[in-house]
């Protein structure tokens, strides 16, 4: 690791955040985890995510909200942070269409609060967790970082693009070193219960119908969580003035193939129920990761069949 000794991780008790916190702590970094344990899904899940970290000397948990400027200012005053890794967000593409004002409040105003709090903190790196959803409906795959991002099709994706723009603005005005990471369909142990792989595993195990929106041919660039954490750590080690990277697996997989892999790992057949597609869903995501490979040394390792098998192994012990 670089000379960064203390890192603030927002959303650190969540799926990706908890894996990242574990990695940072294992590398001797002092980690301050900020999470509000929002009831978007059962907060007990998040507490379980970080249960092995709570008693470690270089891990500190702060319950708080990125919408609360006073809390953020107190945190900044209490530590000498070398970096901020901002993963806290209101997630869920489809749900954002029902609650757009809440998504703006958390994802845009919350990001702005962090940038405003740390604009003169002499950070060595500010890493923003963006999303592949900023690309909207793509014309051809794979998508590169310079491709069109001005036509998001959900409030969630619009808020992620807004976060990137704010990050650039604060880099320009205050010279904050910023790296935006567009994450592609992250999956693995501890993934949120509302995400397709986890939801489908639960329904298959219970013998219930799987709701398939559309014809099941939608393709996603599923990326295993350890590969994403590798990419975040690489970005932390290599700060830039302002840069954007895709972190994906660079292989699009059909939803029906995911169902088949889950059936194989669970040893049970799925019952499919086909429903109309949702207007916020994109038909395909696939990352051009050549920039991340070249500039970060990024190298995803986990194939989808292996990743699904590892997820199911975890799932069977955490039902």
Image (cartoon, grey):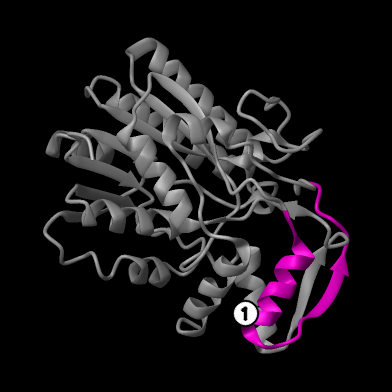
Please tell me whether residue 278 belongs to the stretch shown in magenta.
yes
User: Residue sitting at 26 percent across and 41 percent down?
Assistant: 71
Looking at the rendered image, the quarter that the N terminus falls into is: top left
User: Quadrant location of residue 13?
Assistant: bottom left
Q: Position of residue 261 (x, y in %)?
A: 69, 73
Circle 1 sits in a helix, a strand or a loop, which is it? Answer: helix
Work out whether residue 87 can be spotted. Answer: no
Task: Tell me: residue 193, above or below residue 171.
Answer: below
Q: Specify few, some or many for label 1: CA neighbours under 10 Å numbering under 14, 14-19, or 20 or more.
A: some
Judge from the rendering whether residue 172 lies leftward or rightward of residue 305; answer left or right: left
Query: Tag count in the figure?
Result: 1
Task: Tell me: residue 81, above or below residue 25.
Answer: above
Q: Position of residue 267 (x, y in %)?
A: 67, 88
What residue is disc 1 on?
A: 202
Residue sitting nearer the eye, 233 or 37: 233
User: Quadrant location of residue 213?
Assistant: bottom right
Task: Tell me: residue 145, above or below residue 299.
Answer: above
Judge from the rendering whether residue 1 lies leftward or rightward of residue 197; answer left or right: left
Considering every residue shown, the one lying at the far top of the view is 173
User: Residue sitting at 34 percent across and 27 percent down?
Assistant: 239
User: Residue sitting at 56 percent across and 68 percent down?
Assistant: 306
Q: Position of residue 308 (x, y in %)?
A: 59, 70
Span highlighted in magenta in the image: 253-279
Please tell me whether residue 298 belongs to the stretch shown in magenta.
no
Judge from the rendering whether residue 270 lies leftward or rightward of residue 246; answer left or right: right
Residue sitting nearer the eye, 87 or 102: 87
Work out whether residue 31 can be spotted. Answer: yes
User: Residue sitting at 25 percent across and 70 percent down?
Assistant: 52
Q: Position of residue 114 (x, y in %)?
A: 35, 32
Task: Tell me: residue 79, above or below residue 198.
Answer: above
């Amino acid at each position: 690791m670089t000379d960064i000794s203390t890192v603030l991780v927002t959303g650190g008790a969540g799926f990706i955040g908890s894996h990242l916190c574990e990695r940072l702590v294992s590398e001797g970094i002092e980690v301050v985890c900020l999470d509000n344990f929002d009831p978007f899904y059962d907060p007990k899940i998040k507490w379980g995510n970080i249960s092995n970290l709570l008693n470690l000397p270089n891990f500190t948990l702060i319950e708080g909200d990125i919408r609360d400027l006073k809390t953020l200012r107190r945190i900044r005053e209490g530590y000498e942070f070398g970096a901020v890794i901002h993963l806290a967000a209101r997630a869920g593409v489809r749900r954002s269409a029902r609650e757009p004002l809440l998504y703006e409040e958390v994802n845009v105003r919350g990001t702005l609060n962090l940038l405003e709090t740390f604009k003169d903190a002499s950070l060595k790196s500010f890493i923003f967790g963006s999303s592949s959803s900023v690309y909207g409906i793509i014309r051809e795959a794979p998508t590169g970082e310079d491709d069109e991002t001005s036509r998001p099709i959900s409030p969630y994706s619009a808020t992620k693009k807004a976060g990137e723009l704010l990050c650039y603005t604060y880099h320009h005005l205050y010279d904050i070193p910023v790296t935006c990471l567009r994450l592609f369909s992250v999956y693995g142990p501890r993934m949120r219960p509302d995400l397709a792989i986890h939801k489908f595993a639960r329904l298959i195990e219970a013998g219930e119908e799987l709701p398939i929106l559309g014809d099941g041919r939608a393709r996603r660039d599923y990326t295993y969580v350890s590969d994403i954490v590798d990419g975040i750590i690489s970005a932390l080690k290599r700060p830039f003035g302002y840069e954007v990277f895709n972190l994906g697996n660079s292989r699009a997989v059909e939803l029906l193939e995911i169902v088949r892999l889950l059936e194989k790992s669970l040893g049970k057949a799925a019952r499919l129920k086909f429903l109309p597609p949702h207007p916020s869903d994109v038909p395909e995501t696939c990352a051009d990761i050549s920039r991340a490979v070249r500039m970060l040394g990024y190298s995803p390792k986990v194939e989808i069949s292996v990743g699904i098998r590892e997820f199911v192994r975890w799932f069977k012990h955490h039902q």
